[in-house]
Image (cartoon, rainbow, N blue to C red):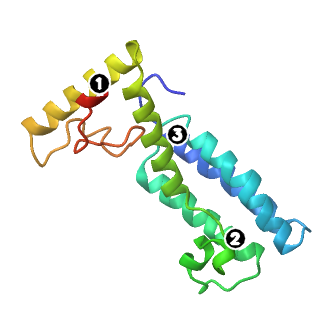
Amino acid sequence: MTLTLDWRQHGSNLRLDAAKKLAALTASLASPRQKLHMLNTVIVPGILAKAMSAPLAPGDVAVLDRMITRAARQAMRLPRSYSTAMVRLDADKGGLGVPSIYARYTAENAASLLDALRDPGSLGRITKALMQAQQQRLQARPGECAEPALSDYWRVPVLMSVSYTHLA
């Protein structure tokens, strides 16, 4: 963790860790189906759990997505030209069924934010106040980010179009 709110080190550590695990998976002697199963049940959930512990830049999440897609292709001995959409498509529909980290990371963050907003205690009050302050800062300076140094990070997705006053 960091005391300066500079999360770049977390992103680079996560990428290195993921690269090691994915390289070990593709080099293993398991069958292609076993590799795909390990990717979907062990490696991807592990990467997602670590990604949720601190904010990541959208670029970091995209890099992780590409690494996982590449590992799935290699595990199944598919050419590089094999479509990413087919890698992500459900297995029962003819794809490999490898989920997108990008979509799951965003969904998990949105769920965490909604849980915090719905909390009847101090967490809910603080989260609502922070969201209102963020909205006011963004409205005061349209077209600009309120915190340029932190604007690349989305631990909590900006859901300014959602009215959260009804959650009180």
Amino acid type, callout 3: Gln
Residue 28: give its label.
none
Circle 1 SS class:
helix
Residue 72: give its label.
2
Q: Which of the image's four quarters has the C terminus?
A: top left
Circle 2 SS class:
helix
Q: Residue furthest top?
A: 122
Which one is in front in this view, the residue at disc 1 or the one at disc 2? 1
* Residue 151 quadrant: top left
Front-most of residues 65 and 133? 133
Q: Earlier in the sequence, mark 2 or mark 3?
A: 3
Q: Which of the image's four quarters has the N terminus?
A: top right
Q: Residue furthest right?
A: 29
Amino acid type, callout 2: Ala
Residue 9: give its label.
3
Q: Image point 69% across, 46% down: which residue?
A: 46
Residue 128: give its label.
1
Q: CA distance from mark 3 to mark 1?
A: 29 Å
Front-most of residues 83 and 124? 124
Q: Earlier in the sequence, mark 3 or mark 1?
A: 3
Circle 3 SS class:
helix
* Residue 150 quadrant: top left
- Dot 1 alpha-carbon crowd within 10 angstroms: few under 14, some 14 to 19, many 20 or more: many
Q: CA distance from mark 2 to mark 3?
A: 26 Å
Q: CA distance from mark 1 to mark 2?
A: 40 Å
- Dot 3 alpha-carbon crowd within 10 angstroms: few under 14, some 14 to 19, many 20 or more: few
Which one is in front in this view, the residue at disc 3 or the one at disc 1? 1
Horizontally, is 95 left or right of 126 in the view? right
Q: Image point 65% across, 66% down: which residue?
A: 98
Q: Earlier in the sequence, mark 1 or mark 2?
A: 2
